[in-house]
Each structure stands twice: as structure tokens, then as C-alpha cells.
Amino acid sequence: MKLLSNSTKVIYLIIMILFIIIVGLFWLDYIGLINIGRMYHQYIAKESPSVVDAADDEPSLIEREEFEKEKDKLLQRIEDLDKREAKIVEAEKIIAKEKEKLEQLQKGLDQEKKALELEKKKYSGYKKNVMDLAKKIESIPPQDAVDIMVQWEETLIIDVLRQIDQNAAKEGRMSISTYLLSLMPKEKASRVMYLMTQL
């Protein structure tokens, strides 16, 4: 009984191995690693391999046509990629030029901003100096003030006289600017009064 049981196990084992082999062959055929149909025709049916399936034969006309089509597609794809790359390179050049222009423009704007800030500081300092000079001129005798003012540039004389007028108007009194002009040499006074109408 024990011997019979062992024989049955052997038979079952053989059947299982055969089943696994058959299933494995079908699975390999399914995933494309082997071709059961081709193996059947070559080793069992003893038929001559076809032109298309012959491993050692030259490629068939259909295969060559398919190969040429794929080759043409690949070449066309490469050509399209080259064209796109050329367009990208050209676009990058244009962008680089525009970026350089913008950088130059920004640099120019920065320089103008600095120049304006410098002028503003200069004007602020100049304006303060004019206000200080106007107060000093008003605080000293008129003839002494005129002797000092005739040594200045005409634009500075005009600005100080105008500041004197503003101070007088603010304080509600008469300005001495006209009197100071009357004490200046006639030629100098005429020149200053003319420029005051132009500036």
C-alpha cells in the first residue's frame, strides 16, 4: 500500500511537471520569447520555413519596405528636431539682445537717477546758502552789503534779492532789494534787473 502510494505520488509529480512545462511554453510564446507555431512547423510538421519567418534568409520585401518607412520617419523626426533647435537658438539670441538692451537702459536710468539726486542735494544746499546769505545781507549796512554782492555771480545776486523779497513778504514789511540795486553801479544794476526778468 505504501509502494502504491509512492507510485501515485510519482505519477502526480510527473503530471505536474508536464503541466508546468506546457504552461511555461505557452507563457513564453505569449510574451514573445518563443514561437510555438514556428517550432511546430520546423520540428514537427517538417515544413520549409517561409520567406518572412526564415531566420537565416535575407529580409523580405515587406520587411525592407517597413524598414525604409521607419527610417524615413526617423529622418523626418531628426529634421524637425533640428529645425526646432535652430528656432530655439535664434529665440535665445533675440532674448539675449533684448536683455542686454534692457540692462543698458536700466543702467542709464540708474545714472540719471543718481544725477538727479545729486542735483537735488546740490540745490537743497544751494537754497540753504541763499537763505543764509539773504539774512546776512539784511543784517548789515546796505552799502557794505552791496560791496559784497557785486563780487558775486549775477545768478547768485538775483537769488539772494528774491529771497530778501520773500522774507519781507513773509514778515509783512518792505523789501530792501530795490534799495540795494540802487546802490550798485548802474551797469551792474541794469544787468541784474534784466536777468531777473528773464530767469
Image (cartoon, rainbow, N blue to C red):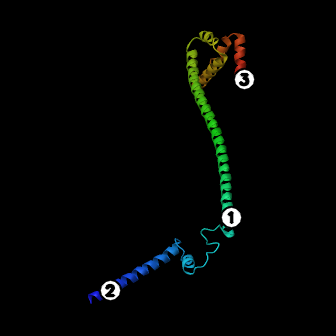
Is 89 drawn above or below residue 192 in the view shown?
A: below
Which quadrant holds the C terminus? Answer: top right
- As drawn, the residue found furthest toward the left would be 2
Residue 64 in percent (x, y) is at: 67, 66
Between marks 3 and 2 in the image, the one whose residue lies nearer the viewer: 2
- First in sequence, mark 3 or 2: give its number: 2
Say which of marks 3 and 1 sits in front.
Answer: 1
- Can the viewer see residue 172? no
Q: Who comes first in sequence, dot 1 or dot 2?
A: 2
Instruction: Give residue 159's position: percent from left, percent from top.
Output: 63, 21
- Residue 99 placement (x, y as % from top left): 63, 41
Comparing 171 with 27, the one in front is 27
Reply above or below: 72 against 138: below
Q: Are marks 1 and 2 in contact (CB under 8 Å)?
A: no
Q: In the image, which disc is placed on residue 198?
A: 3
Residue at 44 percent across and 78 percent down: it is 21
